[in-house]
Structures are given as structure tokens and as C-alpha cells.
């Protein structure tokens, strides 16, 4: 079987950041976040900070997003990023319902990159 060729996103840092903004959004349920985190391969996050943020989100599991936002800064700081500013990273801090679709698309693109042998989720 020949693996499918996945196109590389033009702005990978933005794709990774948008996915993390999606995972931190108050507009998604903890269970949804947990399921997406199980499917995402941490290696698709090329930037060390974004990878650590993802790993900590995944480790926190299905907790409420407000609690996640409370705990995440200290956990990322403890992993070697003392200047981490969650508000700055997530800016704009609040995600609108219209914007959540775009952020979800980013998560789907990273999911495609996590599973290159499978049918793509986005075109």
C-alpha cells in the first residue's frame, strides 16, 4: 500500500496555534477535547513550546476549559517555559462561535498529519 501524500500547510505555526486555541476554547466540551487529544500525535507540533502546551492539555484530560486555562500556565512554566503567557498565546482570548469553525478546521488538518495513511478529514 502506498501512503497518501498530505500537503504541508502553508503556515504551520498558525495551524498549530489555532489547534491549541480550539482545544482551550470554552465552546468545546472536555470530552471532545479529550477525544481529539487522543487522536493527535504530539510530534505534529514542531515548535517545542506548542508541543509542551499540547502535551499538558492532553495530560489534564477532560476537565472544564476554565479549569484547564487556570492550570495550564503553571504546568507549561514547570516544563521549562518560565515566560509563558496563556492570555498572550490565546489572543484573542475569547473565541467567537464563528471563529470556532476555522479553529476546528486547523485541528482537522493536524489530525490528517497525525494519520497520513488514512483518508484525509479535510480537502
Image (tube, rainbow, N blue to C red):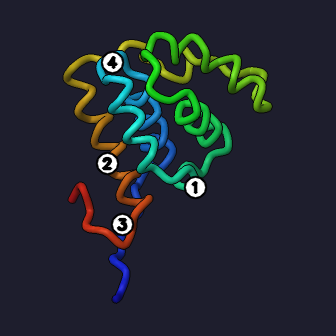
Tell me residue 119's x, y (percent). Answer: 25, 67
Q: Which residue is located at x 32 percent, y 34 percent?
A: 103
Above or below, 87 relative to 102: above
Above or below, 71 relative to 32: above
Tell me residue 1's x, y (percent). Answer: 34, 89
Query: How many angstroms separate mark 1 from mark 3 (CA)?
Result: 17 Å
Q: Earlier in the sequence, mark 1 or mark 2?
A: 1
Residue 1 relative to residue 21: left or right: left
- Under tag 2, what secondary structure? helix
Q: Earlier in the sequence, mark 2 or mark 3?
A: 3
Query: How many angstroms separate mark 2 from mark 3 (CA)?
Result: 13 Å
The quadrant holding residue 24 is: top left
CB under 8 Å between callouts 4 and 2?
A: no
How crowded is the residue under tag 1: few (<14 C-alpha within 10 Å), some, or many (20+)? few
Foreground label between 2 and 3: 2
Residue beneath label 2, please?
A: 108
- In the foreground, 93 or 71: 71
Residue beneath label 3, please?
A: 7
Q: Earlier in the sequence, mark 4 or mark 3?
A: 3
Q: Which residue is located at x 40 percent, y 51 percent?
A: 110
Residue beneath label 4, please?
A: 95
Residue beneath label 1, please?
A: 43
CB under 8 Å between callouts 1 and 3?
A: no
Query: How many angstroms separate mark 1 from mark 2 (CA)?
Result: 15 Å
- Under tag 4, what secondary structure? loop
How crowded is the residue under tag 4: few (<14 C-alpha within 10 Å), some, or many (20+)? some
- Under tag 1, what secondary structure? helix
How crowded is the residue under tag 2: few (<14 C-alpha within 10 Å), some, or many (20+)? some
Amino acid at each position: 500500500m502506498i501512503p497518501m501524500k498530505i500537503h504541508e500547510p502553508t503556515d504551520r505555526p498558525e495551524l498549530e496555534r489555532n489547534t491549541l486555541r480550539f482545544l482551550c476554547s470554552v465552546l468545546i466540551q472536555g470530552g471532545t477535547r479529550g477525544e481529539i487529544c487522543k487522536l493527535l500525535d504530539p510530534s505534529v507540533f514542531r515548535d517545542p513550546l506548542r508541543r509542551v502546551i499540547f502535551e499538558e492539555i492532553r495530560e489534564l484530560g477532560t476537565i472544564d476549559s476554565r479549569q484547564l486555562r487556570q492550570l495550564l500556565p503553571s504546568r507549561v512554566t514547570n516544563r521549562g517555559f518560565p515566560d509563558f503567557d496563556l492570555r498572550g498565546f490565546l489572543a484573542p482570548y475569547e473565541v467567537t462561535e464563528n471563529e470556532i469553525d476555522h479553529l476546528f478546521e486547523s485541528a482537522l488538518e493536524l489530525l490528517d498529519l497525525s494519520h497520513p495513511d488514512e483518508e484525509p478529514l479535510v480537502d
